[in-house]
């Protein structure tokens, strides 16, 4: 069975009436069977066609009621139900005749009440006329006189009115109260579902770590809250709208945001206007929606929620949109704060390990590198300790600003020379290079290229003569990095004592070997 929408479900009053009809239908069917089977005792035998009609109608009605009770299926508008109950009423009246009494009147009222509830006054009147007419035909065919039959019919009609009018009045009052209670319950259930859905969406939004993730969840949350579609729009100060996100349940897939971009491009503008994205949603059958602002007016984020049909009882779409927008605004702010804090943390971590003047790693950055990457490269890791020659004269004669620019140029030249090697500035005019080599001679050759790179003049310090002394050491597998740093430092001083502008290597056989 296809599930019903909230508009198709029977109201509480109609459901109660259906249960009453079901009980009355079963009772009258049983009475008709008993009256038919016992007819030879208290009256003349019935015609075989009457017996068959009664037993067949009663059997069909009882079987259907038993099946419905077993499956717990509610009564629905069903013409076959009215026809079967009308046949049952005619058969019972024909069997019992003028002795029908209240049971016969109830049997006559049942199909009329059903037709009145499910189809209206005209159908109820036609049903009443049909039941009375068939009763007259059957009694006349059975040999009863017409005037007697009409008199009995008048009594049945009067008796059924005595039952129908108060039953209808009482049923109307009871149905009104039941429907009111049902409406209140539906509103409460709808409200509870709304609160639960909002709580789930709020929890997911609170877990978002970036603003892009907030926008994604904001669009997806529309369908979770029962809407057909949701879109997130960014409107700038000029009022131009940009569709940021779009999600929903579409039979033919969501409208392509490319439609908007292509149409906007054809019009010679960079983005859509405030109505064109709405028109794209209208193409998918969406006609009504609510909107709420998420962020401030400077660069406004707006969420729009769309429906095809009205919301369930107890669901206020505008309140729902405002609450969702407030949740998204909090998540948006938290994501922004988190991004700012993470950015500051990255900046602090970078500043703690890098030299502010040259952008190279500082002493902390160098030691961190040697403790991690350098540890894995031991046996093939060379350290080149570099100290500038003549740099103090630049600071003394040309000033510290020129000296700072010279240090930036030196950092660039050293980095370009060593390529993938790790370059750090320890402070002042001292630099260290760590790079992988096959031998210490290879490292010394790289040191020679560094010395040569600084022989070129510096545009920022015309006339200044700057060279460098380089000490080289090879980090053995079982050696301590700090001791190798000292070895490279000592080798650098050896090169400086030898006149500067050269490379000295610290070898295992002889502690320092100056080289020109």
Image (spheres, rainbow, N blue to C red):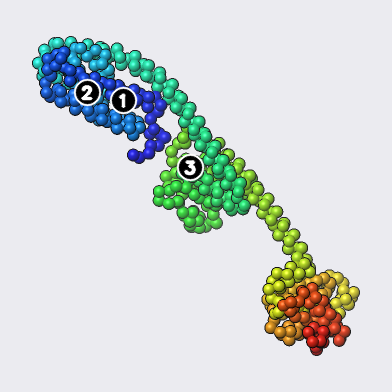
Q: Residue furthest bottom?
A: 516
Q: Secondary structure at mark 2?
A: helix
Mark closest to the chain's N terminus, 2 or 1: 1
Disc 1 designates what residue?
22
Q: Is residue 466 above or below residue 325?
A: below
Q: Is residue 43 above or below residue 123?
A: above
The label nearer to you, 2 versus 3, is 2
For the point 73% across and 69% down, which residue is it?
371
Label 3: which secondary element: loop
Mark 3 to mark 1 CA distance (whole Å): 38 Å
Dot 3 surroundings within 10 Å: few (below 14), some, or many (20 or more)? many
Circle 2 residue: 88
Observer-nearest residue: 387 or 91?
91
Residue 247 higher or lower than 472, as above or below? above
Residue 113: image location, x then y, percent: 30, 21
CB contact under 8 Å: marks 3 and 1: no
Alpha-carbon distance for marks 2 and 3?
A: 48 Å
Tag 1 secondary structure: helix
Q: Position of residue 4 (x, y in %)?
A: 38, 37
| Residue occupying image coordinates x 74% and y 77% | 478
Label disc, if present, on residue 227 of the rendered structure? 3
């Amino acid at each position: 069975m296809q599930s019903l929408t909230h508009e198709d479900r029977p109201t509480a009053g109609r459901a109660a009436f259906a249960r009453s009809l079901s009980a009355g239908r079963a009772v009258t069917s049983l009475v008709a069977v008993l009256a038919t089977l016992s007819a030879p005792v208290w009256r003349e035998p019935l015609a075989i066609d009457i017996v068959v009609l009664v037993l067949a109608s009663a059997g069909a009605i009882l079987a259907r009621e038993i099946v419905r009770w077993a499956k717990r299926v509610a009564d629905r508008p069903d013409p076959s139900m009215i026809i079967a109950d009308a046949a049952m009423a005619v058969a019972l009246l024909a069997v019992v005749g003028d002795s029908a009494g209240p049971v016969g009147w109830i049997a006559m009222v049942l199909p009329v009440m059903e037709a009145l509830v499910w189809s209206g006054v005209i159908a109820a009147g036609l049903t009443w006329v049909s039941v009375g007419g068939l009763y007259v035909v059957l009694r006349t065919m059975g040999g009863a006189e017409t005037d007697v039959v009409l008199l009995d019919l008048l009594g049945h009609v009067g008796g059924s009115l005595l039952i129908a009018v108060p039953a209808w009045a009482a049923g109307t009052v009871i149905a009104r109260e039941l429907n009111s209670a049902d409406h209140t319950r539906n509103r409460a259930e709808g409200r509870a579902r709304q609160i639960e859905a909002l709580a789930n969406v709020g929890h997911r939004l609170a877990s978002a770590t970036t603003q892009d993730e907030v926008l994604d969840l904001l669009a997806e949350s529309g369908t979770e809250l029962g809407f057909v579609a949701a879109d997130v729009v960014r409107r700038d100060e000029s009022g131009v709208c940009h569709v940021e996100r779009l999600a929903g349940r579409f039979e033919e897939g969501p409208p392509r945001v490319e439609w908007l971009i292509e149409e906007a491009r054809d019009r010679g503008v960079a983005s859509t206007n405030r109505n064109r994205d709405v028109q794209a949603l209208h193409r998918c059958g969406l006609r009504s929606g609510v909107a709420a602002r998420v962020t401030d007016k400077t660069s406004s984020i707006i969420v729009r929620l769309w429906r095809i049909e009205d919301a369930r009882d107890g669901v206020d779409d505008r309140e729902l949109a405002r609450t969702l927008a407030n949740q998204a605004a909090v998540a948006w702010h938290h994501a922004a704060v988190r991004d700012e804090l993470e950015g500051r943390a990255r900046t602090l971590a970078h500043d703690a390990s890098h030299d502010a003047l040259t952008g190279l790693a500082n002493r902390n950055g160098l030691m961190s590198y040697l403790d991690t990457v350098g540890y894995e490269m031991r046996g093939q890791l060379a350290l080149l300790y570099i100290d500038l020659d003549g740099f103090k004269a630049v600071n003394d004669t040309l000033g510290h600003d020129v000296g700072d620019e010279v240090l930036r140029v030196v950092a660039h030249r050293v980095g370009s020379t060593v390529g993938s090697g790790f370059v750090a500035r320890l402070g002042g005019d001292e630099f260290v290079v760590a790079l992988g080599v096959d031998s210490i001679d290879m490292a010394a050759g790289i040191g020679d290229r560094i010395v040569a790179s600084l022989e070129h003049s510096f545009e920022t310090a015309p006339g200044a003569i700057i060279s460098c002394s380089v000490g080289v050491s090879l980090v053995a597998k079982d050696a301590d990095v700090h001791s190798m740093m000292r070895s490279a430092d000592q080798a650098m001083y050896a090169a400086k004592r030898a006149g500067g502008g050269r490379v000295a290597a610290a070898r295992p056989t002889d502690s320092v070997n100056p080289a020109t």
